[in-house]
Amino acid sequence: ATKAPFRLNQNQALLTFEDEEVAQRLTKMSKHCVNLDNRTANVTVKPFELDMGFQFELHVTVSGKKINVSDIPELPIAEDWMRDKLELHFYKTEQAEGGGEIEEVTYHKGSGTGVITFLKPGASYNFVRCTKYPFYAEERWFIISVSPHFDFHLRKFQPHCRVSKKTILLKGVPEVEEDEESVQDMIEIHFQKPSNGGGEIEKIKYISRGTAYVCFEE
């Protein structure tokens, strides 16, 4: 269950029902006449909006131009030199035939990782079939690892407001002489009756003055 904090303003009430169909039915009816002792109050039922979120589609594709390189040995040479060695290595390998020209090399000495970007689209596919490659530097042989580089694209990004299925927001409760607890009881009695479209209530909170933050579970 998600706990949703909500600011409840003056003359408003929150009601949570056991059956979500009851809450949705009351929301569709919208206007309700509630008997508050000696007077009838016209109140409005609104959907209870829990929070604001976002909806989007995440598309992941294997890059045709880039590969990730890891396990790059840490050697006592400048980072520029290591980038040059990586570029020469991947340009000369057998897999580079027909598309080994390199556009860019990034190298992170601390993590021993880098990204090789080829000039020709599709060139990276020749490398990811093998995960280990011998690498010669400073008169020694090392084994470096190669893995696919993934491109991430967000699409159909839009804000989304999550609406409670079981809780409703009651607005427009008039000020009356009765105390807050008595008015809350009268509201509960009205919305529990099936003849009013209501049903069994799990929780209710009514505010007659000021504001209050309430936390309902959804």
Image: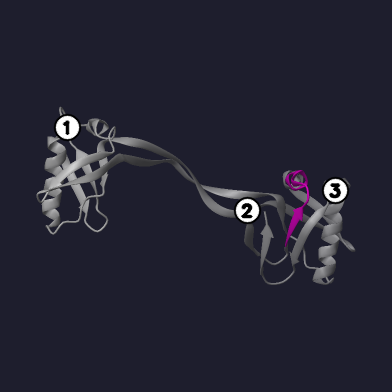
Provide the secondary structure element on which disc 2 rests: strand
2 vs 3, front mark: 2
Relative to 124, say whether 184 is above or below: below
Q: Position of residue 114 (x, y in %)?
A: 24, 48
Task: Say if mark 2 contacts mark 3, CB within 8 Å.
Answer: no
Judging by the rendered image, the residue that carries numbered circle 2 is 49
Disc 3 residue type (three-letter): Asn
Residue at horizontal 73%, vertical 43%? 28
Task: Say if mark 3 contacts mark 1, CB within 8 Å.
Answer: no
3 vs 1, front mark: 1
1 vs 2, front mark: 1
Q: Position of residue 169 (x, y in %)?
A: 70, 56
Query: Whole-Å distance between the Cαs marked 3 and 1?
Result: 76 Å
Q: Earlier in the sequence, mark 2 or mark 3?
A: 2
Q: Which residues are magenta?
A: 13-24
Judging by the rendered image, the residue that carries numbered circle 1 is 96
Disc 2 residue type (three-letter): Glu
